[in-house]
Image (cartoon, coloured by chain):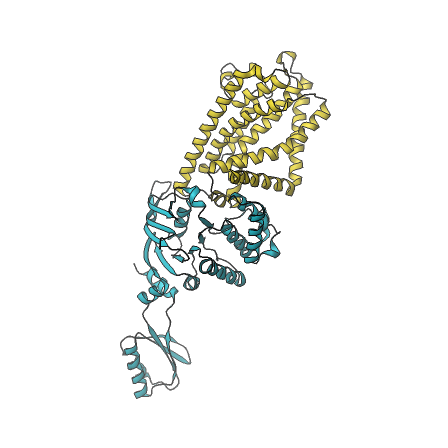
Chain colours: A yellow, B cyan
Amino acid sequence: MIGRLVFLGAEIKRELIMQRRYLLNTIMFVLINYILFMGIYLGIKSFGRGPDLGSGPAELMLGYLLWMYAAGGLNSMGDQLAGMATRGCLEQVYLAPVSPLYILACKSAADVISGSLQVIPIMLAVILTTGIKVSIPILPSLLIWGLTIIGLYGFGYILAGIVLVHKRAGQARELLQWFFFFFCGVIVPLEKLPPWLQPVSRILPLTQGLDMIRALIIRGEALSQMGDKLFLLFLNSMLYLLIGMAVFLWSNRIVQQRGTLSIY
Amino acid sequence: MEPLVSIQKVSKIFKTRANKEIIAVNKVSFQIKKGEIFGLLGPNGAGKTTIVKMICGLIRPSGGKIFVNGHDSLQTKRVHKQIGVVLEGNRNLEWRLSARENLAYFGNLHFLYGKGLKKRIDDLLEFLDLKQQQHNLVGTLSRGMQQKVAIGVAMLADPPVLLLDEPILGLDVESFRLIKNRIKELSHKFGKSVLLTTHQMNVAQELCDRIAIIKEGKTVVEDRVAGLIDRFSTPHYKVCLDNQGMNPNDREKLMRLPKTRFVEQDGGSTTIIVEDEEALWTVLKLLATTRASNILFVRKDNPSLENIFLKIIRED
């Protein structure tokens, strides 16, 4: 157990070293996301979403931040694999005495943690410059956020499997990322989606997580009032995670048979 | 003694995009004992790297079994605790980290931490003569330095088996000598079992206790280095003659003698290769009776592994 924590610690430390070593890149990431959010926020404010849309700036901010994590969760595993393959250390990392599933989970967790260090300044900057006020119940929010991210890891594993076998999965990744952005309630409320798309959107962990986090933070609902929804989010996320893990292990077996693990 | 690595009739068949089968490794078997350096030699594309990767579990064999310290190679988590690997080429390190950070990172990945890891890193930096460069980013180090760091990474968890795929390819003289000596030390002093693949026959001859030569995925021969030399080398002698005053008729007579051949001739001297002792006496007697030429030297040639390797590879 300690060994596995040490493994996770190594990945977090490596990510933090990279963030520090490439500080300019880190600062640019924060700036770009702040500008992107402000663009969307001011655009919506100028053109008006209308009161019937029911979403305020706080909802938009939470949606945007959760989507950033979702995009990170989606991209992280595939990006890490492709990065290791191009840098030439993928096989050496694979020689660690753990499952490749664990390797990717740790790399993604490290990404989430280092990503949070970038998200926090973005959130603070948004709050300071827009005057959006939110009071966040930390533990319930973390629980919902964590379950949502677990489900997104499932998609991350699927994309990592595609990267492993087909070596490039950029377009599949973009497709999922923007699908989540537009059709999971991040900026367009669920009720405004075409009727055929709504059931699809409702079974995605980001939609469920976002809905619950908004209920918790903006509408002030208690976690105890969301028992059914929480259980559903848990089941849904686990299902996506298991499917993702199965696809990744299957892909892993294919590259082991083909001998193409390190080829990129 | 129980072998630490046991390869039993291992095969690997790859399929091309056109669904054509390519047999990369064909029923190869060998064993490596504790404290032994085993050389895997063969021309490019013979299947050496595929065998190394199958031992690590990075490639799945199509047939046969591989055991590392009693663990099936398909049980990758267990096998990875038994091996340290230097893969061919520049494919072992995180080049955006320094040498020391790489050792710490990969040490953590092998569950090492704290003071124990720090001491291990210090010892390895000393052992591999890397103290001066420990804080340099790996991407900025020379090929030799990177290779030394890669060997350090392989040794971090002190595994009983080291798999070194072309560890000395492209190194400068100093790094080459250091790595060669360290490999010898690791096996003979620290009891590590080493699988070494190389194209450099002099290195294999100097380092390896036993050798397998593979060609087109098949083991052509496997033996101790001395055994191979005994089995495949034909002892021969070189007789070097001064050309001055050599009579063409005498030269003709010499050329007609059995088991001799003229291999070299420049302005000043001629070399005759003589296949055995009996033939050598015949040549010397003829030279003495005809007084055809002055003998510059007579030498028994030590056969090299390189010659044997080429002979084996060229034969079917």
Residue at the spot x=57%, y=39% of the render? A9
Residue in the foreground of this view, choosing between B202 and A94: A94
Residue B13 visible somewhere in the drawing: yes
Residue at 60% x, 34% y is A113
Give the side of residue B197 with respect to residue B282, left or right: right
| Up/down of B169 relative to A52, above or below | below
Of residues A220 and B54, the one nearer the viewer is A220
- State which quadrant residue A221 falls in: top right
| Closest to the observer, A219 or A125 | A219
Q: Residue B217, how many percent across, how many down?
A: 34, 51
Question: Is residue A193 something one can see in this rendering?
Answer: no
- B164 on left or right of B258: right
Residue B129 vertical placement versus B239 (above, below): above
Q: Return the x and y of residue B312 as percentages of the image width and height.
A: 33, 61
Return the residue found at the far top: A52
Residue B51 percent location from the top left of the image: 39, 49
| Up/down of A211 relative to A169, above or below | above
Count the marks.
Answer: 0
In the figure, is residue B48 to the left or right of A23?
left
Image location of residue A87, percent across then percent down: 53, 45
